[in-house]
Image: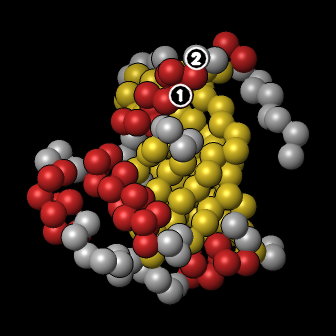
Amino acid sequence: MPPYHMQKSECEIHDPDVIQDILQHGQYLTLALCRDDEPYVLTLSYGYDAAQGALYFHTAPQGLKIAFIRENPAVCGTVVEDKGYKQGECAHAYRSVVFRGQVEILDDVKEKQHGLHVLIEHLEDDPDGMKKRLLTRENPKAAILRIKIQAISGKAGQ
């Protein structure tokens, strides 16, 4: 797919560190999936692994999400940092990223545990207790999925 060009180029975030900051501090992503002509959009908590350029999330091992992903692993998603509506200006302050990538359902136990570790580190204020509870299991019961980011752009509005 050819790159998208923003209509308001002055809003585009060019600094990769700012894009990293949005991903590192976000808590939810909205993910668009599609199979045949049927769209499916969902919001998930996630963990971000900057070294791998990947997002991790967990879900039940079966269900609609897994069915869509098995048929079409190509995804598009967004993470938004909401800075609030600006009263009297009919404007909203925000920073956001839109990413495209491929989602993988992880089978390897070590990869699944790494993904769970990334999630816990990203989301928990005190991750040590949760790590002791969840990472000592030999094989996590939940499905752990990884999105390898292939393209990303950022936008900010003040």
Query: As displayed, is residue 155 above or below residue 14?
Result: below
Above or below 36: residue 24 = above
Percent across and percent down for residue 83 are 38, 28
Front-most of residues 118 and 63: 118
Q: Image quarter for residue 24?
A: top left
How far apart are the two marked residues, 1 and 2, measured between alpha carbons? 7 Å
In percent of width and height, residue 68 lies at 65, 76
- Residue 19's disc is 1
**Which residue is located at x 28 percent, y 48 percent?**
121
Q: Which residue is mark 2?
A: 15
Residue shown at 68%/52% (left/top)?
A: 101
Quarter of the image for residue 86 reads: top left
Image location of residue 106, percent across then percent down: 53, 70
Local secondary structure at mark 2: loop
> Who's the residue at 48% across and 38% down the image?
50
Amino acid on which disc 1 is placed:
Ile
Of residue 80 and residue 110, the one placed in the foreground of this image is 110
Disc 1 crowd rating (10 Å Cα; few below 14, some 14-19, many 20+) is: some
Q: Position of residue 43 (x, y in %)?
A: 47, 59
Specify the amino acid type for callout 2: Asp
Q: Quadrant of residue 133?
A: bottom left
Q: Residue furthest right?
A: 2
Q: Residue at x 62, y 62 (%)?
A: 103
Badge 1 vs badge 2, beta-carbon distance below 8 Å: yes
Q: Residue furthest top?
A: 10
